[in-house]
Amino acid sequence: MSNRKARAPAATRVPRPAFPLPYTTVDIVIFTVRGGGLEVLLVQRPTETSEPFPGQWALPGGFVNVDIDADLQSCARRKLREKTGVASPYLEQLGSWGGAARDPRGWSATHAFFALMPAEGVELAKGANAADVAWFKVDELLASGRKSQRLAFDHEEILRAAVERLRSKVEYTSLPAFLLPEPFTLPQLQRTYEVVLGRPVDKSSFRTRMLAADFLAETGIVESSANRPPMGYKLKDRGAPVFFPRMFSPRGGGEA
Amino acid sequence: MSNRKARAPAATRVPRPAFPLPYTTVDIVIFTVRGGGLEVLLVQRPTETSEPFPGQWALPGGFVNVDIDADLQSCARRKLREKTGVASPYLEQLGSWGGAARDPRGWSATHAFFALMPAEGVELAKGANAADVAWFKVDELLASGRKSQRLAFDHEEILRAAVERLRSKVEYTSLPAFLLPEPFTLPQLQRTYEVVLGRPVDKSSFRTRMLAADFLAETGIVESSANRPPMGYKLKDRGAPVFFPRMFSPRGGGEA
DNA sequence: TTAATAGTGTCTATGAGACAGTATCAA
DNA sequence: TTGATACTGTCTCATAGACACTATTAA
């Protein structure tokens, strides 16, 4: 944790060292499923030209506040709460991106997280440093030929990594259940899998697999209209996803 | 990338901002297989009491040097080269750990990587800030009942995460091939899988699986002693591992 | 009865695990 | 020939995929 010419200061308390420190930020890729597609929450950067990337859309996030954030995870939870009002969605560390070129203000490193939440009941709130907040369709944002404005910083790269990680984990985990409000039905869950994976999955094997994994608890029949009413389910454990013993398709997924 | 009370400075150049910045470091978990076990490279911290954790063993790493490191990945490669002399082993980002409590000098965040390399041909070199460098058996380091000294900082937690990530990816990737010097034989590769996984795997299905994945190129028969000589192989692409369509055992691995 | 969606059963293909058997070398 | 290790074949079992079939509601 220290070598080379960058010498650490003596073990004094508050004083900052003599060598320059990078900026430290946290950014969050917040996913939901809305309107038949995978969507991500973005905030619009302030329009003052003193700020980098004025008016462009970016992942929610910001500087770590050394005085109020005990660690990276709580910093991420704080920013999540500020933007969405949701206290405890599924939250996972994605990785980190750092370098001299990604922020015009100087060398910076961001710790990226990704979160999954149901769209229902989310109250979007602009923060102190965001002109606007909105959901965006991931497919449209990442369409290769799109002419529209790019995301701020290297956030498009981070978003791509988050989508890739989500897609690859969905092949063998119960992650999509965290995108739905409870109770949900198996057909709803299957549609969520299909939306994230971008391809249809077989109904019969899907149901067998979900029920065999033993992570769902029945909550009783859900009323519907003009057809056979489905069974409602909730997660037995909202704390962690379940891992399936095999992938969905017999072709190995991406991941890094 | 900015909100809340932690205000960013104006888009000036070098000057540092008014609010306190965390330290930014990079740490590397360097794995190899030696003497029939999985081992990790550790460095001993300097014994001067002005340094935190004097004399304790730690993962190699240190502060990001804003002047010479273009990004996190190149910072990691630099530290790797300094300790081992190896220029381009398999290197993957593991995650990041940050908080107020992990370094007595103040709020710090480290970007952790993990590397895989063959033990042969590695020249261990103490850095400017390391009293010694050595390989340690992972099993012994992480044995629950061990009395010996703990690792510095939160490096035991990082090491555990790295081992877990490695073990879970080994279930469905060709990662262990990066732990061997080329050319290697299929029995050698199988033994490497078994060392990392900590359990035996079936010879027949192992071979079928490796050859079906089409990532190995024959290099000719390797001479051995007193038995049938094995075929030697090398990786077709040293740039990236291959993903298998199914897990080894029908029980889902860990991962986070 | 029809339309619509929920849910089940049946067949096939694939590949892992177990394990027995064959191949090829030195001594 | 024996011993040792490399390599192959055969059998079984679990499960994904395809797809046809039954179930349950409203209109």
Image (cartoon, coloured by chain):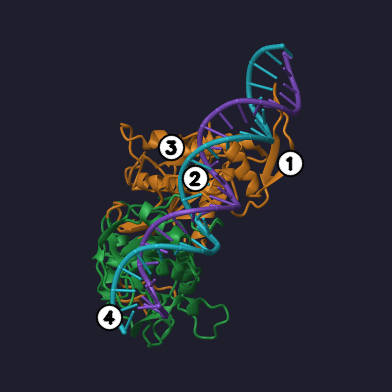
Chain colours: A green, B orange, C purple, D cyan
* Secondary structure of residue under mark 2: strand
Look at label 2 and name its amino acid. Ile
* Along the line of sight, the residue nearer the viewer: A120 or B54: A120
Viewer can see residue B113: yes
* Secondary structure of residue under mark 4: loop
Look at label 3 and name its amino acid. Val
Q: Name the residue under label 2.
A: B30
Q: Residue A125 carries which label?
A: 4
Look at label 4 and name its amino acid. Ala
Q: Name the residue under label 3.
A: B138
**Spatial separation of the CA atoms under disc 3 and disc 1:** 32 Å
Q: What percent of the width, then of the height, locates residue A91?
A: 33, 62
Chain of the residue where label 3 is placed in the rendered structure: B
Q: Do labels 4 and 3 share a chain?
A: no
Q: Do labels 3 and 2 share a chain?
A: yes
* Secondary structure of residue under mark 3: helix
- Determine contact: label 2, label 1, CB under 8 Å: no
Q: What percent of the width, then of the height, locates residue A188?
A: 37, 69
Look at label 1 and name its amino acid. Thr
Q: Mark 1 points at which residue?
A: B219
Which mark lies nearer to you, 3 or 2?
A: 3
Chain of the residue where label 4 is placed in the rendered structure: A
- Determine contact: label 4, label 3, CB under 8 Å: no
At 51% from the left and 61% from the top, the residue drawn is B69
Chain of the residue where label 1 is placed in the rendered structure: B
Viewer can see residue B96: no
Q: Which mark is residue B68?
A: none
Which mark lies nearer to you, 2 or 1?
A: 1
**Spatial separation of the CA atoms under disc 4 and disc 1:** 61 Å
